[in-house]
Image: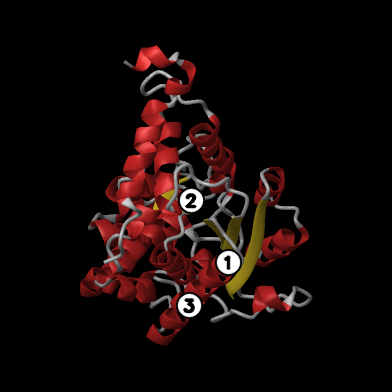
Amino acid sequence: MIAPPSSSVAAAAAERLAALATPPGALGRLGDLAVWLAATQGTVPPPALDNVRLVIFAGDHGVARHGVSAYPPEITAAMVRTFVSGRAGVSALAAAHDVSVRVLDLGVDDDLDGVPDDVRRHKVRRGSGAIHLEDALTPDETDRALAVGAAVAREEIAGGAQLLLSGDMGIGNTTPAAALVAAGLGLPAPEVTGRGTGVADDALAHKQAVVQRALDRAGGRLGDPVDCLTALASADLAASTGYLLEAARQGVPVLLDGLMAVACGLTADRIEPGAAAWFAAGHRSTEPAQSLALAKLGLEPVLDLGMRLGEGSGAVAAVPVLRSAVALLRDVALLSELLPPDAHA
């Protein structure tokens, strides 16, 4: 069981929030976020979020060659190179909002020749198994991926990270992510499976059938969250789970992105209950599984912009909102400071 953020600091932050020179409740979710951030940072007011770090876990998925995505698997490797060059969608957002970006190859089905060694050195395997036909990983590969994610989290924290973000890249990855959510919530595939990159109705029905076949194949293993990663996930999703889990263990807050991050967050909380107290939801994606998992975790998204880009983009877009929450709790005058001394009598 992972200990939650400090309740005493949260109480002190709530007391300061109530004392600000603003009408009660006027700051809405910004006030709630400020209290949560103070509790996770252990001080009131919380420090400015000057060191925010995004790690993108990349990998290919066997199901991507079975008609579940509108794009070919080769796009994964191309996008890793685009991240490295700083030209992806999330790259533009991160540059605008002063968020560092690191991309790691956990399971891309490409050697990524010419890509920096730091990107490639954590590779667990080339691609994952097609989960409706076979396990995504071996148990050893799952353990290795979890350990890589945890080690990366420790590296980012040692570098001074005050807030961590988790991003994803992998064509077809909404299929294993939906399967993880279905396993975690005990739901059938049609309730959790969405359109991903925008597949048409017939492809959606096929995708739902693939997810259900994966769940049926895994059978009684669904109750074990680590075994779920072996049966249903991938190296990149397992590493993301380890990253989120280690952040919670270390007491560092995480801003989750879309379906992949939330599916991994749900799995992390299944592995060690209490992890979710260290998570906030950056945005609501269009994938049904994400909303279902957020409800289970008790998380309300900061943004709801209809985004489904992935990459960590929704979380990065929400960073300025969290920085605004910190600034309000830190810089707004207290009502008591505005009143004449006799007004306190």
Callout 1 amino acid: Glu
What label does residue 255 carry, if any? 2
For the question of whether residue 37 can be seen, the reply is yes
Are the residues at dot 2 and dot 1 in contact (C-beta closer than 8 Å)?
Answer: no
Q: Position of residue 222 (x, y in %)?
A: 25, 69
Residue appearing at x 55%, y 51% in the figure: 310
Q: Position of residue 81 (x, y in %)?
A: 73, 64
Residue closer to the observer: 142 or 337: 337
Circle 1 sits on which residue? 156
**Badge 1 or badge 3: first in the primary sequence:** 3
* Mark 2 neighbour class, 10 Å CA radius: few under 14, some 14 to 19, many 20 or more: many
Taking 230 as reference, is 49 left or right?
A: right
Callout 2 amino acid: Leu
Q: Please tell me whether mark 1 or mark 3 is closer to you in this view.
A: 1
Secondary structure state at the residue bearing disc 1? helix
How far apart marks 1 and 3 lie (CA) works out to: 17 Å
How far apart marks 2 and 1 lie (CA) works out to: 14 Å
Residue closer to the observer: 106 or 193: 106
Circle 3 sits on which residue? 145
Residue appearing at x 45%, y 39% in the figure: 34
Q: Quarter of the image for the N terminus: give it.
A: bottom left
Secondary structure state at the residue bearing disc 2? strand
Residue appearing at x 35%, y 74% in the figure: 231
Taking 258 as reference, is 309 left or right?
A: right
* Mark 1 neighbour class, 10 Å CA radius: few under 14, some 14 to 19, many 20 or more: many
For the question of whether residue 287 can be seen, the reply is no
Secondary structure state at the residue bearing disc 3? helix
Q: Position of residue 311 (x, y in %)?
A: 58, 54
Taking 3 as reference, is 156 left or right?
A: right
